[in-house]
Image (tube, coloured by chain):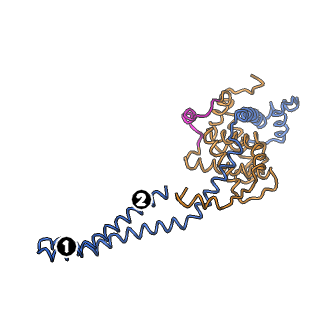
Chain colours: A blue, B orange
Amino acid sequence: MRKSCAWEERVLAAVVGGARDPEVEVHKSACAVCRDAARAALFLAEAGRETRRRAHPPTAGRIYREALRRRREERARRATRILRLAQAGAVVASLVAAPALAAVGWESLWQWVAGLGRSAPDSLATGLQAGGTLLALAGGAATVMLYGLYARWATS
Amino acid sequence: MAIGGPAPSLAAAAPVRPVMDERRFEAFYESTSRRLWSYLVRASGSASVADDLLQESYYRLLKADFTAESDEHRKNYLYRIATNLLRDRYRRRRSLRPVEESDAVADPSPSMGLADDLGRMMRRLSPRDRQILWLAHVEGFRHREIAGILGVKEGSVRLMLFRARKRLAKRLEESGWQPEESR
């Protein structure tokens, strides 16, 4: 089967241009390649005209401003990448440090709870010691929570 | 925006120099946007997708570190970007198949009357057929340019075009389509 015809360009030019060329008409009726090409070209020419007539692209200014805005955002993202990495590192370090602090402070806390049953002065001394540890733990936990909230807000 | 606080001031401090100034861009856009939108709407089968891809195509053109020898060269590059975006979209949707009629019904495109019929006919073709036929017969690109836009060998374009035309002619014959002048 033939995949092209020497007349193809001439047929297409005549068909799309709307010219009545008797030679082309005779050839077209005898050549399947040119007939298909002519039919497809006519359909596409009509589709092209109709679609372009209905085209409603946004204005150039809108596209241009949007492009500038996106470029600025991309630059800002690149510029703040190190900051964001540092923030993520700090959050991870806090999350690792919190259980470590808890493990260290657990013994003192246990002593204080056990000391509640003993005499008041002894219990008070142990309690003061353990209270300091508890305060440090609570402060650490609050810091981690606040930082988590900040990181969430900052990256939203 | 990545970070709430410092980003805007950093962004404002950094001067953004586009490849084209606004006046030049506007002239280029006016001469190409309707044609490109038409290509995108017929190749994708959806006006809303065409809107998105049009915007993205021009954005990438502006962003690209590319010096065009002429507006013709720039236009070919723009169509190449748009075609790559279409291909990425087909891949994402895993739909290297014609868009189903149900998709067309669900698409909130503005009513196009005759264009709807033409669009339905186009949607019965594969995305690659739609692209190559449109580029060759509506946009009037030469085979060499189509090869560059589609990322195929120049020699393949003739064969692809022949097959696509044959498929379209068959569909048109089946549907009884007649050119406007003979109706």
Q: What chain is tagged by disc 1?
A: A
Residue denoted by label 1: A112
What x and y, as percent, mark residue B95? 56, 45
Could you say which is closer to the camera, residue A29 or residue B155? B155
Quarter of the image for the N terminus of chain B: give it.
bottom right
User: Which chain contains the residue that carries disc 2?
Assistant: A
Q: Position of residue A9 (x, y in %)?
A: 83, 40
- Which residue is drawn at the image coordinates 53% and 59% (left, top)? B5
Q: Callout 1, which amino acid? A: Trp
Q: Quadrant of residue B47?
A: top right
Foreground disc of the pair 1, 2 = 1
Q: Is residue B174 left or right of residue B102?
A: right
Lateral position of residue B108 relative to residue A151, left or right: right
| Residue B106 located within the stretch drawn in magenta | yes
Q: Is residue A12 above or below residue B26?
A: above
Q: Please give the range of residues in magenta.
A: B97-111
**Magenta highlight on residue B112:** no
Residue B80 location (% of width, % of height): 70, 51
Residue closest to the eye, B90 or A78:
A78
Q: Mark 1 and mark 2: span between their CA atoms?
A: 32 Å
In the drawing, what numbered circle is on residue A88?
Answer: none
Disc assigned to residue A149:
2
Residue A3 seen in render: no
Element type at mark 1: helix
Looking at the image, residue A84 lies above or below residue B148: below
* Quadrant of residue B13 within the rendered picture: bottom right
Query: Are there few (<14), some (14-19), or many (20+) residues within 10 Å of tag 2?
Result: few
| Mark found first going from the N terminus, 1 or 2 | 1
Q: Which residue is at the far front? A: A121
| Front one among A102 and B73 | A102
